[in-house]
């Protein structure tokens, strides 16, 4: 296969993965939105804040449970192949580590739940829910291992089935159902445990039926050393990532109120949807990048990175404009009191656009064996976010958290692009970025004009239809034949 055919094939694989991820995420969004509306309208901002803070505890626990397993599997399984005994040994190793660490972390969480509650949301209910949450950690950790295995062998549809369909569906049934039946926040937390068990059962079934990883293979000492040399730095990387992504809401719980946590969580969740294009294209970019880099096909890797980055930015730009201009109308969907998060939505949305504009730069650094640079990035940005949030939340309240986090997200993404350029001589930008900017400007004018005449749901619907049509129409008009041809070939395949 020639380089041109290989590039189209890889773009096709990444695009197909992105499409599957977006479809799955649409299902996840609907299920999560229904669950969230049930919780916010039934529990109110204060109790929902406890639930939101509880969910934020899970990523922190997962870092110590999985010890970088998700990215390590993305690196090693594509390198050796699905059927290779080494790949199966790495899966066995990651699952064993996850199970042991989940028990350790769960015990610690159960013991120190009252202390954590006093340091953050000082309410007895939060302490009780933390202790219930400890029970779900083994199931949650192993499920994420399974999802990473599917992703590493490019069977993304199974990852979507587990994380984007099964998990939110079980949460709607068990969490939403518990609240509707009157069991309040305690019932919702028990529902989280039950939904995690159900999701793990789905993952195990799919792994046993559709992969070669149903058998246990004992890793060698060298396998363990290789795995830990890669995974341990990425554990610190994930800790830094969590600090720069979630320090704001942890500190809002520390310095403000559970109601403020609820408002902030809804706001950043809405802005977080803008990361969907980046997340979608990142599903299969890492294993493909790892394979290209391992085979010395660097020019092909650069072309792939350049095209994918432009596509991500183009897809993300209009939704960002739509959400920023209509932030108040969107927040009102969740009930009284949530419109206080307008500026939070605006600032974090712009930061997410900056995140999208650099594409898969973080994964590119990681897959080209610069994991220590990736770790340093995350640790430095995490510490910076802690400092900025501490200062700005005390000075500005809710908005201060958004200012701090948006600043750090934008800065770290600029740093990643510069590092990729310096270390690998790969730069993704060209004059083609002018095209989505022109289309976005035209769409923004239409949305502003609609805002003078309409409001509420009517404004949202017409903004989506008229603004989206304008944006898409101008993009299509400005595309060159060289840009259209790869898209046609991908569709034809």
Image: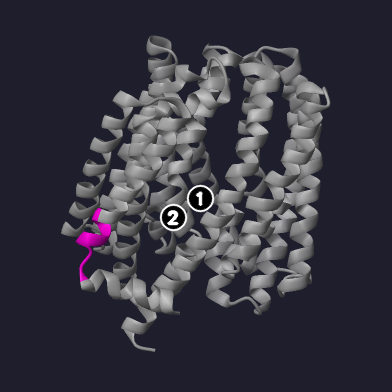
Residue 25 has which mark? none
The 10 Å Cα crowd at callout 2, few under 14, some 14 to 19, many 20 or more, is many
Residue at x-position 51% and y-position 50%: 234
Judging depth in this view, the residue of 227 and 318 nearest the camera is: 318
Residue at x-position 38% and y-position 81%: 6
> Which of the two discs, 1 and 2, labels the residue nearer the N terminus?
1
Residue 199: x and y in percent read: 75, 51
Residue farthest toward the left in the current orientation of the protein: 431
Q: Which quarter of the rendered picture does the N terminus lie within?
A: bottom left
Q: Which quarter of the rendered picture does the C terminus lie within?
A: bottom left
Residue 265: x and y in percent read: 54, 27
Q: Is residue 476 magenta?
A: yes
Residue 82's quadrant in the figure?
A: bottom right
Residue 185: x and y in percent read: 75, 23
Residue at x-position 36% and y-position 32%: 324
Q: Where are the magenta residues, as a range?
A: 474-480
Judging depth in this view, the residue of 364 and 174 nearest the camera is: 174
Residue 233 has which mark? 1
Q: Which coloring applies here?
A: one colour
Residue where numbered disc 2 is placed: 371
Please give left or right for residue 77 compared with residue 218 in the image.
left
């Amino acid at each position: 296969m020639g380089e041109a055919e290989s590039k189209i094939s890889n773009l096709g694989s990444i695009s197909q993965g992105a499409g599957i991820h977006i479809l799955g995420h649409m299902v996840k969004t609907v299920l999560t939105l229904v669950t969230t509306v049930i919780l916010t309208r039934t529990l109110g901002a204060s109790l929902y804040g406890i639930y939101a803070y509880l969910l934020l505890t899970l990523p922190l626990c997962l870092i110590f449970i999985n010890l970088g397993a998700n990215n390590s599997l993305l690196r090693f399984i594509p390198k050796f192949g699905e059927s290779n005994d080494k790949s199966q040994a790495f899966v066995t190793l990651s699952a064993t580590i996850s199970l042991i660490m989940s028990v350790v972390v769960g015990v610690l969480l159960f013991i120190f739940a009252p202390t954590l509650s006093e340091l953050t949301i000082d309410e007895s209910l939060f302490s009780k829910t933390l202790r219930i949450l400890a029970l779900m950690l083994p199931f949650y950790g192993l499920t994420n291992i399974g999802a990473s295995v599917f992703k590493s062998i490019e069977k993304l549809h199974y990852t979507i089935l587990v994380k984007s369909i099964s998990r939110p569906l079980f949460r709607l049934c068990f969490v939403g159902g518990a609240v509707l039946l009157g069991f309040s926040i305690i019932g919702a937390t028990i529902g989280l445990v039950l939904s995690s068990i159900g999701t793990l059962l789905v993952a195990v079934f799919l792994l046993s039926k559709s992969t070669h990883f149903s058998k246990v293979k004992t890793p060698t000492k060298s396998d363990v050393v290789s795995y830990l040399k890669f995974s341990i730095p990425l554990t610190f990387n994930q800790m830094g990532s969590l600090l720069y992504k979630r320090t704001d809401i942890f500190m809002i719980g520390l310095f403000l109120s559970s109601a403020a946590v609820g408002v902030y969580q809804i706001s950043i969740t809405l802005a977080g949807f803008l990361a969907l294009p980046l997340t979608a294209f990142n599903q299969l970019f890492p294993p493909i990048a790892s394979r290209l880099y391992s085979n010395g096909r660097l020019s092909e890797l650069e072309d792939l990175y350049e095209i994918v980055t432009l596509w991500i930015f183009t897809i993300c730009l209009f939704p960002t404009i739509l959400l920023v201009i209509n932030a108040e109308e969107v927040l009102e969907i969740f009930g009284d009191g949530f419109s206080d998060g307008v500026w939070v939505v605006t600032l974090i949305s712009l930061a997410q656009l900056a995140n999208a504009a650099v594409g898969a730069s973080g994964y590119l650094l990681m897959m080209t064996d610069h994991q220590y640079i990736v770790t340093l990035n995350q640790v430095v940005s995490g510490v910076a976010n802690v400092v900025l949030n501490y200062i700005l939340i005390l000075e500005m309240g809710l908005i201060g958290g958004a200012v701090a986090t948006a600043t750090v997200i934008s800065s770290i993404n600029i740093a990643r692009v510069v590092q990729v350029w310096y270390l690998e001589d790969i730069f993704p930008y060209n004059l083609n970025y002018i095209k989505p900017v022109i289309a976005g400007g035209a769409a923004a004018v239409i949305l502003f004009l609609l805002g003078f005449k309409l409001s509420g749901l009517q404004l949202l619907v017409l903004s989506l239809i008229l603004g989206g049509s304008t944006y898409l129409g101008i993009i299509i008009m400005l595309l060159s034949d060289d840009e259209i041809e790869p898209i046609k070939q991908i569709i034809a395949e």
